[in-house]
Amino acid sequence: MNKKYHVRLSESERKTVQEEMGEGKTPKTIRKRCNILLQADETLGKPATQEEISKRCGVSDVTVYQTVKDYDTQGLAYVLRRREHEQPPRKRIVTGEKEARIVALACGEAPRG
């Protein structure tokens, strides 16, 4: 079966990926993407299959496919970016008015008794 997307990391890209994995502040999702890229790299020999990579990294086959596809079509910087959401995943429970009221209660005088 012919592969549609390929990962061929240059030396500088491999170094960037390894540095990104080594940093303590790197989010877990980006570390997983780095690990996927390193295991799917074809420059060091025959890479593992998508199923093997997904089992080793603890992600789904779709995640491996999308990461490889994004690298091949968009580049390394696109894969290693933090994805911004238009809206937060959850709506805020405390809105501006409620927050102002809570702050006023907290900063006000304590009740007697």
Image (spheres, grey):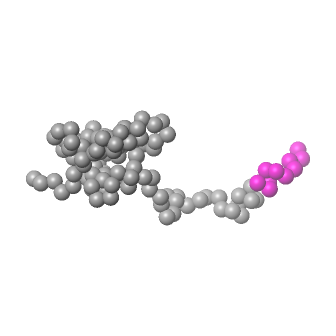
In the rendered structure, does residue 81 fall within the stretch colored magenta? no
Q: Nearest the camera: 7 or 39? A: 7
Direction from residue 17 to residue 44 in the image, left or right: left
Residue at figure coordinates x 21%, y 42% from the top left: 43
Boundaries of the magenta span: 103-113
Q: Residue furthest right?
A: 112
Residue 22 visible to the viewer:
yes
In the rendered structure, does residue 109 fall within the stretch colored magenta? yes
Residue 90 rendering spot, x and y as whole percentages:
52, 58
Residue at figure coordinates x 46%, y 37% from the top left: 23
Residue 69 rendering spot, x and y as whole percentages:
27, 56
Q: Looking at the picture, does residue 3 appear above or below residue 113? A: below
Q: Looking at the picture, does residue 73 appear above or below residue 107? A: below
Residue 51 visible to the viewer:
no
Direction from residue 99 to residue 55 in the image, left or right: left
Q: Quadrant of the C terminus?
A: top right
Residue 111 rendering spot, x and y as whole percentages:
86, 49
Residue 89 rendering spot, x and y as whole percentages:
49, 58
Q: Nearest the camera: 33 or 112? A: 33
Q: Looking at the picture, does residue 95 appear above or below residue 110? A: below
Residue at figure coordinates x 48%, y 60% from the top left: 85
Direction from residue 37 to residue 107 in the image, left or right: right
Q: Nearest the camera: 33 or 20? A: 20
Direction from residue 49 to residue 58 in the image, left or right: right
